[in-house]
């Protein structure tokens, strides 16, 4: 299974929220900088207060310090050297802070407590705790109330064993939604009561932070439970065993809790110490956050190790084990690097690294997950279709080796698998780009008004990546579809006419080429446009050339397009006998533009598809052949019927063409009366193309049979009545015959000559 | 007998708590209304038989709880049972200071208990007491509601009434807590106003002073509920008696924890002999293996096997009943309670209540007769068709 491969992903799944928090934490610093820039707007009174507050913020002071260092070089273009020296200065300042923090690490908690008491009396703190308890109780009460109405539904979801993947996902989603609904009630109750109390500013800040921690942790755990379902194997969306799901879920919960608590603590300490003058306190806050983050790092490392321990022993293939080791090491080193960058306070680099570093394992993880879901769906389809397969499978079970039979299983979702993969990757990459843009401080919606080179480069980069990703998505979809059609195509066996797929097999590669050319040209146009080239003339030129070619090749295009439609109609196939207008013959071959038909006498007609109008196809499904015999009026019809029936039965037995009959030869009785005879109708129905041989044989046998039974075919004769009793001499007979000659020789109207290849 | 005793005593206590909380809810409007309405809400509980019943209920309910703890086979249980057990253990230590302060304060210090005094103490002098009181309220209410609902859900009328009762279970404590907060803030505001007037410049944290002085200050602008001490006491006598109260509280704590420890010790001794293993094969293919001692139901729950148990193993509902297919273990014989229930359900001879059977070592094959997500209303509809209930439940379970 993909267990181990997923395992690494699972670890990174744990990371997501945790990193998200770190990111949030860091973005506060960014936000602070942005706010500071807004302060230059002179109109708002409130902003001055904000400005004062910001000035006392350690991050801002640091920022100002750096600004003053680089002020001299600000007028020049920002060179790489300047940036680098700025970074070095920043690190140096940070280093001093770190030393100070290290020295004060022992006193830090004491300072915090002291400061706490300074701002809030013990009575107030206890009251705050009481308030908190009350609003949490009310929130929990509302959630309980909600649970009373939904519990039975939830229990039903958990007990019912979902049969299909669709049901499974549906149950898991419903379960998560019900849990989140309860959370919503909790939030409503607690926030409602929270709002109804009046709070001291500091207490309010603190309580709000705690509330956010509780809500975040619970949402995170719900999400983790949605995927892992540690107690319900049936609802689990990932291929984990019970023990694995349990461990991953536990550590995910612990890390989410620690990370949110950590953020809240840092914020609270910063807030507590923000208004106090003096360097020392700032550094003690720093030392505390250092410790907190170190603790978080340690917990994360333990989590990685534990998860690794759970997944490695069950993986059998060495390759997967290596992959698991690699991802565990990757994440562990990644986290350490992030922590070091945080310690050195290189914000931009750290945030970018977080985004890029997370993108890689996440892409991998989601890819494996999508594959797993598709495997599940396919497996389900195959087991549900199993009752159809056996008839065929048992027949050639000995002949086909297992691997091949595996490949023969229906794979209904194969077309969508690569698309789903690309789509998840697409979404992830777009998200990563967006967050990178936010981190780097670019305004996504206002790019054109920022004319610096970096912005321009960034803009171009985004355009190019977006165009490439979309083109890639379309290309992969079309390619999968076409390749699947081509792979399914089986060339005709010798002696059999190729089906319509044969022509598809020639057309699809053509379509594929057209598509890739179109995509490449569109992407290159878009890239050129975003680079600033004026693509107007290019487009116009392409348009003019296209127009010229279009006029010139009008009929050609018409031929190709109508050819595609005839193909879709399945009007004719190679080897069929067709009739187009005056022309008729067997279809010999088809090209992209035209159809080649050979007349049964050897002439070859080439007909462009565009010229085809109505087509008569003589080779479809069945043919009825009707025969006529002229027999004398005194014939015994019952006997005739019997004889024909017998012949019909004999023909059916014939080894050469008996199998071609659809309906046997049978008599239709007297079709009409003529001057000298009756017309006996006989008909039979066969497969197309076999009628001629059968007709020949039928004529032959019927004649023989009639002959043997004394039935003669009617002949034209003239009866001359002589109204005299006297015997006629030879001369008179001659005269009479001469008189009747005219009647005999009266020309008979010629019937149509049946054609025959 | 014991079950109904436990329910009746619990109900009496719950009734008392409810009246108390309803009274407290009035604090949302004003502290005076809260104080004025107090005598009406407590009217019943002042009458001797009722007071006696309350005290008796309290003692009985506590000792029955300790007995249940002693008889409990496993400490692994469903989350609701866990909440019930922990809350019951928490109630006594949270209650001791409150109850002793009220009773002893009345007898020793000659203080008639009233809300104004208490709110002042809880919000200004000893905020920790306020916190404890809030905790007590929550724990008691949760414990009471769980017990009540577990009992009521088996009644036929409950399915109809439940949607209207549940909101009540949330609304009462919410309003009581809001009343507590509102009245407390009112008290704090008044205290601050008095402070600002400079009438009382000195302020310290002792109980006795707050109990004597601040009520008076509040009394000045409240409507004149008499809270003056019946007996005039000097400051040192007062201090002595307060110390006495504190020592009583301390010894009550120690006594309670010693009792608890004793019960746990006794339980440990009782369960010490359970070393053997029992293996249970369920009809749907699940197999569990566990140490003997707990009942079949407890074994199911602790091994995450879904098993219907509407009354939480009290032998009242019969939803946990199982059919013993094959067993080479010694099953504890059915008591009267179980026999009566099985008879009422027209069960076959091989049917047992999983919550009552304590299996010995060996292998048991059994079948759960009811689905794990059975609802109380399903129970009543099938109980009405008593004649075919036994066969029906068999077929239900097998489908």
Image (tube, rainbow, N blue to C red):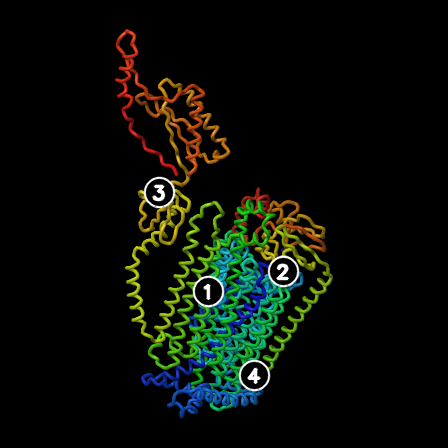
What residue occupies the far bottom of the structure in this picture? Answer: A72
Q: CA distance from mark 4 to mark 2?
A: 60 Å
Same chain check for tags 4 and 3: no
Q: Earlier in the sequence, mark 1 or mark 3?
A: 1
* CB contact under 8 Å: marks 4 and 2: no
Q: Quadrant of the N terminus of chain B?
A: bottom right
Give the total of numbered labels.
4
Q: Rate crowding at label 1 as few (under 14), some (14 to 19) or many (20 or more) other CA atoms within 10 Å.
A: many
Question: Label for residue B302?
Answer: 2
Identify the residue at horizontal 30%, vertical 30% (top origin): A750
Identify the residue at horizontal 44%, vertical 69% (top origin): B26
Please give the residue where the numbered disc 4 appears in the rendered image: B234
Please give the residue where the numbered disc 3 appears in the rendered image: A584
Badge 4 marks a residue whose secondary structure is: loop
**Nearer the observer, A521 or A98:** A521
- Chain bearing tag 4 is B
Please give the residue where the numbered disc 1 appears in the rendered image: A422
Give the x, y percent position of residue B393: 58, 46
**Nearer the observer, A91 or A134:** A91
Mark nearest the camera among 1 and 4 is 1
Give the x, y percent position of residue B61: 60, 63
Q: CA distance from mark 1 to mark 4?
A: 86 Å
Give the x, y percent position of residue A2: 57, 63
């Amino acid at each position: 299974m993909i267990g181990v491969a997923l395992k690494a992903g699972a670890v990174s799944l744990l990371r997501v929220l945790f990193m998200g928090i770190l990111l949030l934490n860091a973005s506060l610093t960014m936000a602070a900088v942005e706010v500071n820039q807004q302060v230059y707007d002179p109109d708002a009174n409130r902003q001055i207060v904000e400005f004062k507050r910001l000035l006392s913020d350690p991050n801002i002071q640091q920022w100002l310090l750096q600004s003053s260092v680089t002020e001299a070089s600000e007028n020049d273009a920002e060179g790489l050297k300047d940036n680098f020296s700025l970074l070095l200065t920043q690190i140096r300042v940070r280093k001093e802070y770190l030393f100070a923090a290290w020295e004060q690490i022992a006193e830090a908690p004491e300072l915090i407590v002291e400061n706490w008491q300074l701002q809030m009396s013990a009575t107030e703190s206890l009251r705050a705790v009481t308030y908190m308890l009350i609003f949490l109780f009310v929130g929990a009460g509302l959630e309980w109330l909600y649970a009373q109405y939904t519990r039975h539904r939830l229990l039903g979801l958990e007990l019912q064993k979902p049969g299909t993947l669709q049901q499974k996902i549906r149950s898991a989603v419903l379960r998560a939604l019900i849990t989140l609904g309860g959370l919503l009630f909790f939030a409503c109750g607690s926030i409602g009561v929270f709002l109804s109390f009046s709070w001291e500013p500091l207490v309010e800040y603190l309580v709000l932070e705690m509330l956010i921690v509780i809500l975040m942790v619970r949402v995170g755990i719900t999400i983790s439970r949605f995927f892992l379902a540690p107690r319900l194997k049936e609802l689990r969306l990932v291929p984990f065993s019970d023990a694995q799901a349990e461990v991953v879920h536990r550590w995910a919960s612990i890390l989410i809790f620690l990370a949110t608590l950590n953020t809240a603590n840092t914020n609270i300490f910063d807030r507590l110490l923000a208004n106090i003058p003096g360097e020392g306190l700032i550094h003690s806050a720093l030392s505390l956050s250092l410790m907190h983050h170190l603790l978080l790092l340690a917990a994360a490392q333990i989590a990685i190790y534990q998860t690794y321990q759970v997944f490695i022993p069950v993986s059998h293939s060495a390759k997967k084990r290596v992959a698991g080791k690699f991802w565990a090491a990757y994440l562990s080193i990644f986290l350490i690097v992030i922590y070091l960058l945080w310690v050195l306070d290189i914000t931009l680099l750290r945030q970018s690294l977080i985004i890029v570093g997370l993108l890689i394992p996440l892409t991998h993880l989601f890819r494996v997950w999508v594959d797993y879901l598709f495997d599940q769906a396919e497996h389900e389809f195959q087991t549900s279709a199993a009752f159809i397969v056996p008839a065929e499978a048992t027949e050639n079970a000995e002949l086909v080796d297992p691997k091949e039979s595996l490949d023969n299983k229906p794979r209904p979702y194969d077309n969508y698998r690569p698309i789903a993969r690309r789509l998840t990757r697409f979404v992830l990459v777009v998200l990563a780009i967006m967050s990178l843009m936010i981190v780097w401080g670019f305004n996504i919606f206002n790019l054109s008004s920022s004319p610096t080179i970096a912005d321009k480069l960034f803009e171009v980069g985004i355009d190019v990546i977006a165009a490439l990703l979309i083109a890639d998505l379309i290309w992969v979809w079309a390619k999968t579809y076409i390749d699947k059609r081509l792979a399914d195509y089986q060339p005709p066996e010798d002696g059999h006419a190729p089906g319509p797929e044969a022509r598809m097999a020639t057309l699809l590669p053509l379509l594929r080429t057209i598509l890739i050319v179109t995509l490449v040209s569109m992407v290159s146009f878009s890239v050129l446009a975003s680079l600033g080239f004026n693509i107007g003339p290019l487009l116009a030129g392409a348009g003019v050339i296209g127009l010229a070619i279009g006029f010139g090749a009008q009929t050609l295009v018409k031929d190709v397009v109508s050819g595609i439609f005839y193909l879709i109609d399945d009007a004719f196939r190679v080897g069929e006998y067709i009739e187009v207008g005056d022309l008729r013959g067997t279809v010999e071959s088809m090209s992209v533009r035209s159809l080649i038909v050979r007349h049964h006498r050897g002439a070859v007609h080439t007909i462009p598809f565009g010229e085809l109008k109505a087509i008569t196809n003589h080779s479809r499904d069945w043919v009825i052949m009707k025969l006529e015999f002229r027999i004398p009026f005194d014939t015994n019809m019952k006997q005739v019927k019997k004889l024909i029936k017998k012949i019909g039965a004999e023909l059916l037995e014939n080894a050469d063409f008996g199998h071609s009959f659809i309906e046997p030869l049978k008599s239709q009785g007297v079709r009409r009366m003529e001057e000298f005879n009756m017309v006996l109708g006989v008909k039979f129905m066969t497969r197309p193309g076999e009628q001629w041989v059968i007709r020949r044989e039928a004529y032959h046998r019927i004649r023989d049979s009639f002959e043997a039974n004394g039935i003669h075919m009617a002949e034209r004769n003239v009866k001359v009545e002589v109204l005299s009793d006297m015997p006629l001499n030879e001369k008179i007979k001659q005269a009479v015959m001469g008189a009747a000659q005219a009647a005999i020789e009266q020309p008979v109207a010629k019937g149509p000559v049946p054609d025959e290849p | 007998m014991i079950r109904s005793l436990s329910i009746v005593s619990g109900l009496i206590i719950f009734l008392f708590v409810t009246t108390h909380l309803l009274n407290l809810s009035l604090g949302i409007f004003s502290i005076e209304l809260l104080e004025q309405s107090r005598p009406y809400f407590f009217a019943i509980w002042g009458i001797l038989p009722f007071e006696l019943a309350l005290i008796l209920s309290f003692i009985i309910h506590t000792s029955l709880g300790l007995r249940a703890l002693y008889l409990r086979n496993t400490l692994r249980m469903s989350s609701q049972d866990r909440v019930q057990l922990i809350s019951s253990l928490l109630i006594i230590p949270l209650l001791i200071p409150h109850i002793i302060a009220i009773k002893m304060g009345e007898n020793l210090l000659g203080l008639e208990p009233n809300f104004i005094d208490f709110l002042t103490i809880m919000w200004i002098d000893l905020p920790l007491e306020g916190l404890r009181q809030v905790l007590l309220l929550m724990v008691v209410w949760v414990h009471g509601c769980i017990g009540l609902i577990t009992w009521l859900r088996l009644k036929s009328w409950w399915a109809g009434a439940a949607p209207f009762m549940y909101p009540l279970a949330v609304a009462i404590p919410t309003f009581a807590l809001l009343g507590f907060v509102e009245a407390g803030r009112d008290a704090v505001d008044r205290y601050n106003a008095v402070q600002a007037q400079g009438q009382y410049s000195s302020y310290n944290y002792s109980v006795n002073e707050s109990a004597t002085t601040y009520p008076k200050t509040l009394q000045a602008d409240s409507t004149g509920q008499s809270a003056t001490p019946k007996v005039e006491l000097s400051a040192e006598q007062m201090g002595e008696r307060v110390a006495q109260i504190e020592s009583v509280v301390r010894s009550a704590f120690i006594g309670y924890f010693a009792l608890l420890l004793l019960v746990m010790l006794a339980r440990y001794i009782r369960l010490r002999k359970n070393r053997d293993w029992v293996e249970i094969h369920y009809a749907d293919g699940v197999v569990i293996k566990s140490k003997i001692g707990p009942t079949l139901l407890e074994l199911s729950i602790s091994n995450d096997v879904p098993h219907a148990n509407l009354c939480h193993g009290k032998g009242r509902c019969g939803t946990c009943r199982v059919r013993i297919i094959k067993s080479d273990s010694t099953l504890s014989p059915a008591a009267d309670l179980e026999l009566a229930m099985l008879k009422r359900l027209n069960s076959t001879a091989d049917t047992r209540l999983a919550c009552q059977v304590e299996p010995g070592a060996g292998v048991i094959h059994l079948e759960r007769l009811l689905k794990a997500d059975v609802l109380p209303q399903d129970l009543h509809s099938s109980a009405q068709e008593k004649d075919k209930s036994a066969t029906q439940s068999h077929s239900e379970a097998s489908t």
